[in-house]
Every structure is written in C-alpha cells, then in structure tokens.
Image: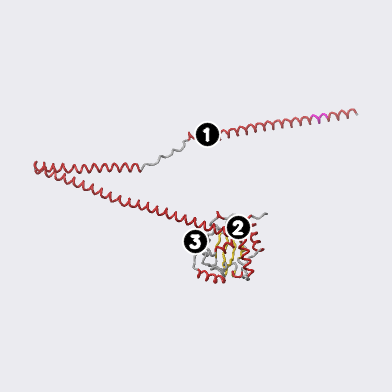
Amino acid sequence: MSKSPSLRRIQADIRELSFDPSPSFHAAPLENDMFEWHFTIRGAEGTDFEGGIYHGRILLPPEYPFKPPHIIFLTPSGRFEINTKVCLSFSAYHPELWQPAWGIRLILEALISFLPTPADGAIGALDWSSKERKRLAKASQSWKCPHCGPICSLIPELKGKDGDCNNKKASSSYSKEIAELHRLQQQAEANRGGNKQQSSEERDSGENLSGGEDILQMHTPEEEIVFENDEDDIAGDTSELLDGASRDHKEGEATLEGRDSSHTGTPDISSHEVVSESQQTGTNHDVAVGASEEPVAIVPPTPLSRRYDPLLNILIVLLVAICYLLFQKWTELSHELQELEAWEYTQQLEQQNQFGFNEVAKDNAVTEL
C-alpha cells in the first residue's frame, strides 16, 4: 500500500536533516504524531539572541507540503510570544505565499534569520528591549521541554571555525529563499498597515455620519414640542374668546359689538395659523407617505407560466423519446425471444423425427436378418 504524499515528504525531511545535520538547529517529529515537530534553534551571532537556545513546535497540516504549517515558540525570547501561533511569511497565516518546495530545513533557517528583525506589529510578535532579550538568551540555555527534555542537549555546541563554516554553508544554500521570505513579510505587513488605515478612515466617516444623524434626531423633538405648544396656545385663545363673547351678549348690544369686533379680529389670526398648520401637516403627511413607499414586489411565476417553460418542454420531449426507444427495444427483444423459442421447438421436433427414423431403420434391419 502506497503512503500518502504528506508522509513521503515528511520522511524526506527527516532523511535530509539526519544526513546533513547543522549545529544551529535540530528538529524531529514526535513518536506518536508525524505531523507535530519540535525544533530547537540557536540564536545568530552578533545579535541580541547570541548564545540563546530556543525551542518550539511546527504543526504540519494534513495537506503538507501544499499548505504551510503553524509555528509556535515555547521558549521566551523577547521576539515571539510563547504558546502562540506566530504570523510569518512562511506560516499558515499566509498560505498564498507558501511554496511546496519549501521544507523543514528552510523553515528553521528562516526562523533564525527572523529573530533579529523588527516585530512590525505582526501576530505573535514582540519588540522587547535589547537588555531583556539578552537576559532571556542566557536563561534559555536551562529551559526544558516536557517531551524532549533539556533543549541544550539537543543541538551540539559550536566548535570554533567548524561551526562558523557550517553556519555559512547552510545560510548560503538558502540565502535567496530567506531574502525572498523577508521581502514577502515586509510586503504583507505593509498591506496590513494600509488596510488598518483604510478601516480607520471608514470608521471615522461612519462616526461623522452617525453624528449628523444624532444632530437631526436632537432637533426634531424640539420642533415637535414647539409645534404642540402653538396648538395649545391657539386652542386656549379660541376658548377664551368664545367665553368672552357669551358674556358680552348678556351685558348688552353695545358691549357685544365691541366684543364682536375684537372677537372677529382675533380668530382671523388663529384661523390663519390653523390653515398654515394644516398645510404643514399635509406636507409632513406627503413626506411620510413618500418615505413609507415600499418597492414593488416581484410576482412569482404561476403554474401556467411553467407549462410554457422551453427548458421544461425540452426535458419532457427527451423523456418521451427515451421511453419510446425503450419500448421499441423491449418489443424487438420479445420478438427475438419468441423466434428463439420457436427455433428450439423445431429442433426438438427434428430430433424426435430423426430418432424415430433411426428406430424404424433398426427394426427393418432386424426383420431382414
């Protein structure tokens, strides 16, 4: 039984690391899970991570090497958060940048080169001070993994010039790929920063629009209150004038005429205000009616329209044609079956006649003897 492409590729990565080990890193899968690797890398010389030994996990997907893995650091370094899936140009956060030709060795070399780079606000990235990173580099040498034990014993110690030669050889073989990974990482972070700026601008514009709506909503109740107060004033003035007119009618004609003149002058104003009020109400009613208009609903097709559907008619014609061909084939087969039965019956009769003829011939021969 052939193995899956993922397992074949994982075994190829294991052979590559075992045949060509490096003093700068070590990686191997777990005994019970080939898709989870534990790696140990050494900090690059001349950086804040010099002398540090950092341990982590590589979680390969079932589609590896066609999809990138997740990378998790377990040792504090001041550059990456621990127990967090970090965002890098060769991790699962950027599947569009991943290439199936990349393997475990390239990932380890890239991790070493990415340690001294700036964080740039990426997921799982830290930007601690140089002093804190150097302190963590010294403390990392005594760190222990629950599965692998002391990480200091997983990679051999550097032996002067031999270690330098091995580092230069390994880095030179993947220098182009690592430079491309750095470029892709910077491009991805730049795009992410542009998206953040655009989203902030959209959010600000949305806040401005919502602020304008709030202002409109704040002014509307005041206008309604003023309008209601005007109605109350008009109603009160009208009732008072009517009461005064009734009293003047009882007092006398002279007083009634004076009151009537004042009474007729005042209602003109109130009637004018009432007319303007009705006009405003009618205008508001028209606006409300226009705003409450709903879009015309689309009428669903009726059963009668489905009968004249050309596609449905074509399917019906094809189905009828298939049924006709099947019936014709069944008729031909039944006819052939009848002919076959008649032929078999004829053969049986011929055999019986031949057998009877042979018996008669034998009897004649016996009688002649």
244 part of magenta stretch = no
Above-or-below relation of 52 to 258: below
Tell me how far mark 2 sits from mark 1, CA to CA. 54 Å
* Residue hosting label 2: 102
Magenta-drawn segment? 353-357
The overriding secondary structure of the stretch rendered in magenta is helix
Question: x%, y% of residue 31?
Answer: 62, 63
* Identity, as a three-letter code, of the amino acid under mark 3: Asp
Q: Which mark is residue 279?
A: none
The answer to which of 229 and 125 lies nearer the viewer is 125
Amino acid type of the residue tagged 2 in the rendering: Trp
Could you tell me which secondary element the residue under label 2 belongs to? loop
User: SS class of the residue under badge 3?
Assistant: loop
Mark 2 surroundings within 10 Å by alpha-carbon count, few (fewer than 14), some (14 through 19), many (20 or more): some
The residue at which mark 1 appears reads as: 310
Q: Residue at x 68, y 30 (%)?
A: 335
